[in-house]
Image (spheres, grey):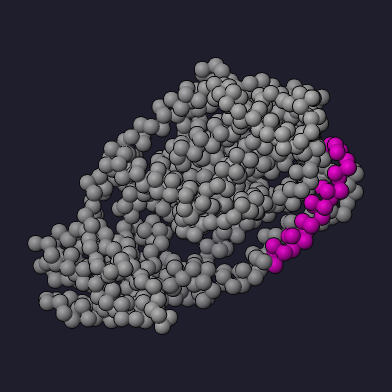
Amino acid sequence: MDRFLAGRFAPPLVLLALSGSIFFLNLGSAQLWDRDEPRNAGCAAEMLAAGDWVTPIFNDQLRHQKPALLYWLIMSAYGLFGINEFAARFWSAALGMGTVLLTWSMGVRLFGRATGFWSGVILATMLMFGVASRAATPDAPLIFFMTAGLCAFVWLGFQPVENSAEEESRFLGFPQATLQVIAINALLGLAVLAKGPIGWVLPMSIMGLYLLLINHRPLVAAESDSPGRLRRGLQWLWNVFGPGNFWRALVELRWVTGLLVVLAIALPWYLWVGLRTEGEFLRRFFFEEHLGRATTSFENHSGGWWFYPLMLLVGTFPWSVFAVPVVLDTDRWMSVRRRDGSLFLLCWAGVQLGLFSLVQTKLPSYITPCYPAVALLLGASLTRFAAGRHADLELWFRRGVRPLPAIGLLVAVALIVVAKKYVAGHWELGLIAIPLVAVAWLAWGQWATLRREVLGGVAVASALFCGLMFGWGTVVVDSTRSMEPLFSRIRATAPQTRIASYKCLESSWVFYGGRPFLELQSEPTGVESFSKPKGWMAPPRLAPSEYLLWVGADHARAFKRAAGAVAGGVSGPCRVRLFPPRRAAGSARSEDRFAGGRGWDGIAAAAQVTAPAERTRSAEFDGVRATESQPTSQGRGIWQSGFGLRLGKVVIRNLLREASSRP
């Protein structure tokens, strides 16, 4: 093993093979998962079709949630592989592999070759990092470029571990050469293009906090021996965060130069898209997406102070079984003397967890950029365990591994139960957790002589678990989704037909249907209006002579009655056809529940309304607004009340009015 770790090319090649097999295995076999993947992939497809590399458009509407870097990457993959699931996810997997190599590189610099290798293995086999590296979302580009910027900081600011006698790298100071500052901030500028200002603010906060802690004036012996913990604590806070130390950290960071570099890279696109959209993108991106998510809980994504610590344990599984011994070992390690590398990694993880705990909208993916730091802390601690250091903590490491087989059995049972209820009874999904059970012999083995085997066994079990989960489990789950009949119906409609939906639209319908959907939403007043497209938006693709309206299962009866009433009062030829739901042969009701009621079986009817032919020329429109009111006082929903019938009449009447109002 030592000879392998000493090799120059063997460790990174093994890490590439390991991460590539996990991230690329059956990468394009499963359809895109609602809702973010089809939105991002569809936005790239629409931009590519329009030849527009500036304005993000999805479903003929401005997509203001994310910057353009992800779309550019997906568009380049479309040019190589065609428009498909593999191309949409290709760059996420490739950048995930790159992040594993960057983590290995930082581990080698900070702790040595053994820690670097094991940290790369740990990161590649973390559950949530695997999700980020296999999804067509901005998480993988953000993690990669943030990690790349921090990796450049490590390589330029830390002394290398030259031999095995040196336990940890020493910090030399923030790089001051102009080219070095430009290199670090250029990488962070690409992170800003991946997900916004957080791509620069977060790494600068990490490096700034580290400089505050590493450069502050320590308490002298007389001060530390003086009575009063409160006084000593306040003195420490003043030394660290006082104006003098804070100003020195800002000067050392050279943040003005860094900001100019970031602006030079990211600002041109932000200005361009702002001008193209008359400021609409910038307003919605910065105020709604960033300020709004920070101050309010979007889409009920909330949680307490415990949310991100819990998500960190789930996201780093199966390695999170070592959480307690690693915390104890790291505390023991840093209490002996100054540990520059470990302190930097703690700042990295601490800033990420602390900052997003203050944000009101909480999602597990928000903290994935700190996973490389967590993997390095785990790798350093487990490498010390394998070398026999801190023998008094060995009992805690045993307690960390011993429950793993039991956890594997619980996961297997849970997967079987979930599969029986939601995935058409595919109980074989429980086999995914079998590798975790297979390490049982290590938990009860000869710990004194098999420490490395314990580490290797957990690594193999984690790799097999993630490989089965992503490469096989996702394909099995995808096979139960009965969406193709819906996509076929959409693709089979006449080119002049405008597709509309009410209370049942998913982004995957737009991507796989290859057609824009007119999404109907409601207003409490029931007053409908058609909005004109902005000048910078793509013009309506069709001048339809008929409208195909997809209605959710809970609303079909009201729309059927409304359609009949409206059709009876329209002069000239008009027909209303209802398409009853159809179930794929052999499909089970559990498939509907897994799809959340949004699959093909969740759609009860579609009303095809054809207006008089002579009145349908140039019928251009962009959107209709319509809303579901609160249940009545008798506890009945609106579709069991008279309001549902009136609202259905309003929606269909306006569809016909728009078609017939143009000369």
Magenta run includes residue 516: no
Q: Residue at x 69, y 30 (%)?
A: 235
Horizontal side, residue 543 vs residue 603: left or right:
left
Q: Quadrant of residue 615?
A: bottom left
Main SS of the magenta segment?
Answer: helix
Q: Residue furthest bottom?
A: 634
Query: Split into 4 quadrants, where in the image is the N terminus?
Result: top right
Region in magenta: 386-413
Looking at the image, residue 658 lies above or below residue 249? below
Residue placed most toward the observer, 313 or 236: 236
- Which residue is at 82% across, 47% downward? 397
Left or right: 376 with respect to 1?
left
* Residue 342, image x, y percentages: 71, 33
Q: Residue at x 23, y 52 (%)?
A: 533
Residue 435 falls in which quadrant of the image?
A: bottom right
Taking the spot 50% from the left edge, 27% from the top edge, the residue there is 185
Residue 302 seen from this side: yes
User: Is 253 in front, or is 226?
Assistant: 226
